[in-house]
Structure formats: C-alpha cells, structure tokens
Amino acid sequence: MPLSPAPKTVMAPIEFAHLGEGEVAYVRELMSEDVQGLFPNAPEIQPGIRLWALINANGAPIMIADSREVAFASALEHELTTLSLH
C-alpha cells in the first residue's frame, strides 16, 4: 500500500514576507554607487568605495559600514542571527 504524502503547510504571502524579520539578517557587499538604491536618504558617497550593508530578512536595509566586521558586529549588537547567501 503506497504511503500518502505528508500534508503541506502553506504560508500566506504576508506571513512569508515577515519570516525571520527582526531575528535574521545577512551582510551584503556593495559599491558606493549602489548605496542610493538601498538607502535613498543616504548622502552621496564618492564612487568606487567597497561597503557592506546589513539587511533584514525581509530585505529592508538596517545599516551600512565600511568593513564586513563592523556589519557583523552590528548584527550581534542588534541580536540578529546572520546567514550566508551564495
């Protein structure tokens, strides 16, 4: 007798959008030319500078730093678990 598949749990889109919010974040490298796209209110920055952004699980930017270590330290300070994205 074949086994029936386990029932699937379906999340509403709004629930999925908030999954991990305030708990999980990721650090992303970006160039200074891309800052305005994530942080519209940021002042203009000289082009060609490598920066690091801490991004909330829902894609909202949290902060920007000039080093990867500072971005990870900020995640720890805000009690956020960081995940790697490849």
Image (tube, helix red, strand yellow):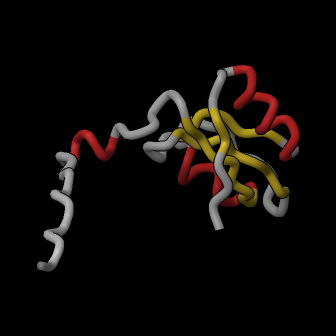
Determine the residue positioned at 84% across, 57% down: 49
Vertically, is 79 above or below 10? above
17 on left or right of 37: left
Vertically, is 15 above or below 37? above
Determine the residue positioned at 67% across, 55% down: 84
> In the rendering, at what x and y percent does residue 75 appear?
70, 31
Vertically, is 69 above or below 84? above
> In the rendering, at what x and y percent does residue 23 appear?
53, 30
45, 53: nearer the viewer: 53
- The answer to which image quadrant residue 21 occupies is top left
55 on left or right of 10: right
Determine the residue positioned at 87% across, 44% down: 67
| Residue farthest front in this picture | 1
Determine the residue positioned at 54% across, 53% down: 37
> In the rendering, at what x and y percent does residue 64 appear?
71, 39
47, 2: nearer the viewer: 2
The quadrant of the rendering that contains the N terminus is: bottom left
> In the rendering, at what x and y percent does residue 73 appear?
81, 30
The quadrant of the rendering that contains the C terminus is: bottom right
